Amino acid sequence: MPQKGLLVIISGPSGAGKGTICKSFVERNDCWISVSATTRQPRIGEVEGINYFFMSREEFENKIADNDFLEYAEVYGNLYGTPKSRVEDILNSGKDVILEIDIQGAMQVKERVKEGVFIFIMPPSMEELKQRIIKRGSETPESLSKRFASAFEEMNFISKYDYAVVNDTVELAVKKVESIITAEKCRVGRIIENNVHIK
Ligand code: 5GP
């Protein structure tokens, strides 16, 4: 039987750099990064179906009712969710799947997929994290302070994850994620079970 893909969940506070790490990881490795659905407005340069599937709240709520999401959460006033069927198909085809999602969503996946690998991306320091969110420049003053406040709170969730990767440089952080995935694939339990169960 072909080995199923690994479901890798990458999260961490806003500004920790998980998006950059995931992008670089996906460029260097044969895997698939899930495209989430969201009710947030597209930012300049964001493309439908590449960055997100942008939709109305009503459309999103219909998908929740149809049980179309592996997980979903409200983040900074917008809904975000992982479309389930594509993730299942790709895992079954043997390819690894990366989910770059918030902590609430990661905790839902943890309940449903016991074989998932949960990686928490940490900023080198909280001051650095603050600077990164400011530099991004895509936030209003109100959403900036919301993001700071939840970033501080989110650091408390680190103990729920399997691994923590400090993002001091993207190159090094990506190498650490690659090492984690390599090691996970060598786990005896995983080789014996060779299975991913989504409840
Ligand atoms: P942004 O609006 O900056 O693109 O994303 C805001 C937050 O939503 C980030 O922490 C990002 O990881 C998270 N996010 C993106 N897609 C999903 C998803 O499908 N599910 C959940 N739970 N969070 C998501």
Image: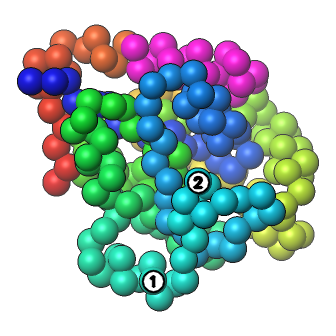
The Cα–Cα distance between marks 1 and 2, rounded to whole angstroms, is 19 Å
The magenta span reads 166-182
Corner quadrant of residue 191:
top left
Residue occupying the point 30% across, 17% down: 185
Residue 127 rendering spot, x and y as whole percentages:
85, 40
Dot 1: element: helix
Q: How is the image coloured?
A: rainbow
Instruction: State the mark number for residue 9.
Output: none
Question: Please, what is the three-letter code of the amino acid marked with disc 1?
Answer: Glu
The dot on residue 50 is: 2
Magenta stretch, main secondary structure class: helix
Residue at image location 89% in from the left, 44% down from the top: 131
> Are there few (<14), some (14-19), or many (20+) residues within 10 Å of tag 1?
few
Q: Position of residue 169 (x, y in %)?
A: 75, 22
At x 30% / y 81%, what residue is drawn?
Answer: 65
Q: Is mark 2 within 8 Å of ligand 1?
A: no
**Mark 1 lies on residue:** 59
Where does residue 194 sit, x and y in percent of width and height? 15, 25
